[in-house]
Image: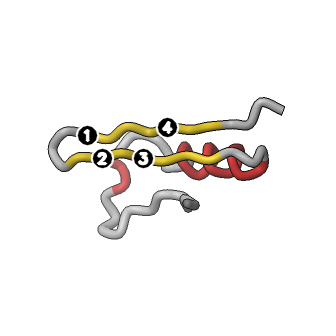
Amino acid sequence: MAFGRYYSADGNAMRFEGLGLGLFISSEILRRNKGDFWIESELGAGSAFFFRLPIN
C-alpha cells in the first residue's frame, strides 16, 4: 500500500492540521526497509495503524 501527500479537493485544507505528509513518509521508511503496514478501520469508531519491520 502506498500513500501520497494529502491534498484537499475542496480547497479547505486549512481546517485540517498538518501537511498531510505523515503516512507518506512512514510508508516510504517502511518500504525502503522492507517493512509493511496495514490499517484497520471501522466507520464511526476510528482507525488503527500497524507496522512491521524485519529484525535484520
Tell me the crowding category of disc 1: few under 14, some 14 to 19, or many 20 or more residues within 10 angstroms, Cα based: few
| Furthest-top residue in this view | 55
Amino acid type, callout 1? Gly
Residues tagged 3 and 4 counted as in contact (Cβ below 8 A): yes
Would you name the residue on which mark 1 appears? 46
Residue 22, quarter of picture: top right
x, y percent for residue 48: 37, 37
Foreground pick, 9 / 3: 3
Spatial distance from mark 2 to mark 3, Cα to Cα? 6 Å
Amino acid type, callout 2? Ser
Would you name the residue on which mark 4 appears? 50
Foreground pick, 12 / 44: 44
Spatial distance from mark 1 to mark 3, Cα to Cα? 10 Å
Which quarter of the rendering shows the C terminus? top right
Residues tagged 2 and 3 counted as in contact (Cβ below 8 A): yes
- The answer to whether 7 appears left or right of 56 in the picture is left
Residues tagged 2 and 1 counted as in contact (Cβ below 8 A): yes
What SS does tag 4 mark?
Answer: strand
x, y percent for residue 27: 62, 50
What SS does tag 3 mark?
Answer: strand
Label located before the other in sequence (2 or 1): 2
Amino acid type, callout 3? Ile
| Furthest-bottom residue in this view | 9
x, y percent for residue 13: 37, 55
- Residue at the image point whose x is 26% and y is 40% from the top: 46
